Each structure stands twice: as structure tokens, then as C-alpha cells.
Image (tube, rainbow, N blue to C red):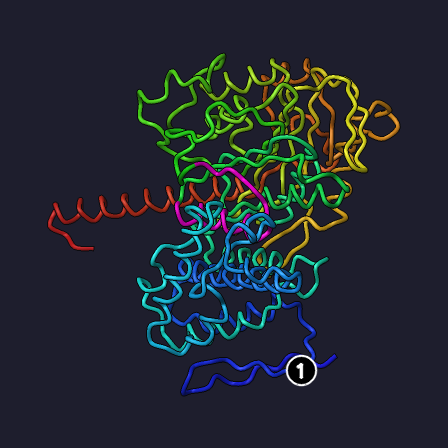
Amino acid sequence: MPKLKEEPANKATGKVKVSKQIQDKPIEVTLWDAANKLRGSVEPAEYKHVVLSLIFLKFASDKFEDHRAKLIAEGKEKYIEMPDFYNMSNVFFLEENSRWGFLIKKSKQNDIALLIDTALHTIEKNNKALKGALPDNYFSRLGLDITKLASLLDTINDIDTLKDPKQDVVGKVYEYFLSKFALAEGKGKGEFYTPKSIVNLIAEMIEPYKGIIYDPACGSGGMFVQSIKFIEAHHGNKKEISIYGQEYTNTTYKLAKMNLAIRGISGNLGEKAADTFADDQHKDLKADFIMANPPFNQKDWRAENELKDDPRWRGYDVPPKSNANYGWILNMVSKLSENGIAGFILANGALSGGGEEYKIRRKLIENDLVEAIVVLPRNMFYTTDISVTLWILNKNKKARSIKSGDLERNYRDRKGEILFVDLRRWGTEYEKMFVELIKKDLEKITFTYHGWQQVDWQKTYKNIPEFCYSAQFEQLKRHNYSLVPSKYIEFINRDSEIDFDTEMKRIQKDFKTLLKEEKQSQEQLINAFKTLGYEL
């Protein structure tokens, strides 16, 4: 098939023209290539809000126009300017100045940034579900190049969001753009996005089929989106799911609300962006499923005497203020329902820390909450290259059965057992520097985990050297309640047990210390000779 050909930018307008040949790229890739060329000097962290807001605006307008046409076709023309006739069908009502067609007609005007800000403000004002979701006076403040903004509008105008009802076109575009922006922002940023293969793995392992789903650090809402996709894939009922989340950063909170709105997903993300520890937006919540990727090794997350009597720690030691990892764990434990299950990502250090962390970890194991520990490959995240761990906590490891859609499980009693899985050597490289778990990887991992859970588990599961091991409580006790998988999984090749990243960092640190000491010794020697009246 012929490739889509991009013509040089028009020097007068700055617009990148895209020839109308048959496209052999997915629409999201084509749009990203075009939109990114128009970014200019705007940082990715800022530009993502520009592009994603416009994608949302285009989608909302397309839905509005489509529903408006249906009302007219049904002889209800007198109702086409009444918001209730749109809201009842889960369609956002748009006033004239908020409609995409209006903005496209005005796109070459000098006040287009102000017109976009006005459109977004008006949509949010008229639709309660969007309260706090859209950028406020953002386009005018950013001072975007007018010709580039006009060209960006033209580029996004090419998205036919309603072309194929069976395909979530705008959802695919939005998700792709989120991942590309996270990639562009790189280390130290991009925390709003959890790589898709990790989210898929969590969903396929904990199977959020019915009930309340909660994410205490929800970022841009990827966990919720994948939960809904899981339900759709297994022919479940989306109406049997309720979504609750919380996000600390205001701009990311808005991204999450837009991400849900764009897919028609209802969710309670709290009244505002807020710190989950200092201002819990869901204090009395009990969730059936928790999916989370909280910040790694968050330091000074509370003052010395703050939150000491917080009910979330009841029955456990107070998590140390030097690291929030166990604060996040206990927050999630406190939110689990009687049969609740949680899947979340933490840095590997939480598997074996001492002090209060040791006491809390021991209590979690003694309370039989830990069901599985999965060490993931390095380089899966855009923000860090370290290996991290997926924890599965389960409030009900007893024998029971579930059925929803085509999902059916008959669980055995797994009291006192923990499944350990090591994936450090797994994954497929992409973008020359990152690793992801592809479909066949996810299938093998989830087959192993669910096989281990089943009544006939001895037919569907076995311990495999360098991959998985089912440990009993007495073994955990002998290893002083460590959750490091290599203490339990058999390694035929003993080199597999070495964490080369940690070892190289230790050597690097030692080498730096030696060089520093050598330099100090040289300086002392030179000064000694100077004192004696000699120059070296």
C-alpha cells in the first residue's frame, strides 16, 4: 500500500499538509506525527493538555452533532437546543460557541486561543459530569503560535470520531497520545501514565468483573479504562461496575476526568485534586477491586507527628515518614471489601525493608493478605529504569466460585500460600530503550496465576525453576518474612539470582568513593609538600 506522504510545511501558515493518499498507518500514529510537528517550542508537559483538550472537544462536538441530527430526524426539532435531550442519552450539550464547526470557522483569527478557552469553559459549566475536568483559561495563558494552533485544529479536524461504532477511535487516539507524551517527557515526569502492558497484566490477574473499583493514585485513569475493556472482552455488564479514584496533581486530575468522559465512563474522582493521605476523598469506601501505580519511594509524605492515629493503619505499625510505600499499601488494605482484591505496583525495596516496614510486612503475611508477588522486567516505565514489583493482595483466599459474563472461576483454599513469579528476563523491546510484556507473555503469566488458584491446581500449575514457586507460610517464616522471589524460586543458573542493576550501582558508588578518597589524598600530599616549602 502507498504510504501517507507529508508535504513540507507552508511557510506562510506553518501548517503541515498531509496528502490524501491511502493511509497505511493507524490514524493515531498519523495524527501524532502531524500534531507533534506543530508543537514548536512548547514543552510536551504543556502541549499534551493542548492536544488532548482539542481531541476531547472534537469528540464531544461530533457526538453532539450526531445526536442533534437524530432528534431532527425523529421530528423533535423544537428540542434541539434543550440540554436535557442530550444528557439523557449520555451526550454533552454544546452551545453554539462551543461547537467544533464554530471553532474551525474562526481558526485563523487572532483570538482563536480565547475562543477555545471560552468553548471549554462553557461546556464544563453546562455539564455537571465535567466539573473540574477541562483546562481553565489555558490556551490564552500559554501564548501559542496562532498559525501552529490553527494548523493543529485542521489536523484534529481530520479525526472522524464516529466512523466505526465498533471501534473506540477517539479512545485509541487519546490513549496513544497519552503514551507518546509520557515517553516524550521521560524520567522525572510522565507519572500520569502507566504503560499499557502493566495495566493489562493487573486487570487480567485480578479480573475486575463486578463491584467497586478504586485507584488511590489514578493518574490519567488508565486503570479504569482497562477495567472496562476487561469487562467488555469477557461479555460482562459495565453497569455492574462503579469507579472511584483520587489524584494529587490538578492537571492530571483533569486528564483523568477527560479520559473517562471521552469513553462515556462514569466515575467519582473526588471533589478536587487532593493528597490521598492528607485529604482522603473516599474515607468510607470499601472496594471490591483496587488497581494502582502509586509514586515509588515517596519521601517525606507526612510530617513527623502527622497521621500517627490515622484509622487506615489500625492493627499495624505507623508507616515510616521516610518512605510512603507501606502507607500506600495500608491505605489500600483499609479500603478492601470483605472479598476485595488489590493489584498494585511498588519499587522492589518494599519486598525486604526493615524497621516499621518489616513489622507491617510480617503482619500482612500473618494476616494472610498477600497472594502473589510478581517481579517485572526493568525499563517498563518511562519515568524510571528500575525493576518493580506487582503485588496481589486478597482478603478472601478461601474456596469459592464466581461467574460473570464468560468468566467462571472455582477457587481452592490458598490459606498461608503465596505465589512468587520472576519476570526479570521477560519482555520485548520497543522504542529501542523500553520493554513491554506482549500478548503471549500476559497469557502465560495469567494462566500460571489462575491455574495456581484453581480447585484442580495440581493439574494446571507446577513450580518452574527461574519462573514461579508456590511458598508455604513456614517457608516465609524461615526467610524472616521476606517477599523477595529469588529466596523461594529455584534458580538453576545461579547468575539469575544476581540483580545486576543493583550490583552495578553498588560498584559505581564504591568506585566514586575510591576516586574521591584518592583525590583527597593527593591534595593532602601536595599541601604537605607546600608546608615544607616544596612545589610538586
Q: Which residue is mark 1?
A: 21
Q: Please state, as top left, top right, bottom left or bottom right, where the N terminus lies in the image.
A: bottom right
Q: Position of residue 385 (x, y in %)?
A: 53, 48
Is 495 in front, or is 74?
74
> Which stretch is magenta?
250-270
Left or right: where does residue 162 sit relative to residue 460? Answer: left
Instruction: Report how many numbered discs are placed on residues in the image.
Output: 1
The answer to whether any part of residue 429 appears in the image is: yes
Is disc 1 placed on a helix, strand or loop?
loop
Residue lying at 73% horizontally and 36% vertically, measured from the top left = 466
Residue lying at 79% horizontally and 30% vertically, measured from the top left = 403
Above or below — where is 25 with respect to 310?
below
Q: Position of residue 74 (x, y in %)?
A: 66, 60
Tell me, yes or no, whether the highlighted magenta stretch contains residue 398.
Answer: no
Left or right: where does residue 40 sit relative to residue 77? Answer: left
Q: Position of residue 65 (x, y in %)?
A: 57, 64
* Residue type, mark 1 in image: Gln
Q: Position of residue 423 (x, y in %)?
A: 68, 40
Above or below — where is 418 with respect to 17?
above
Tell me, yes or no, whether the highlighted magenta stretch contains residue 260.
Answer: yes
Q: Residue furthest right?
A: 459
Q: Please state, as top left, top right, bottom left or bottom right, where the C terminus lies in the image.
A: bottom left
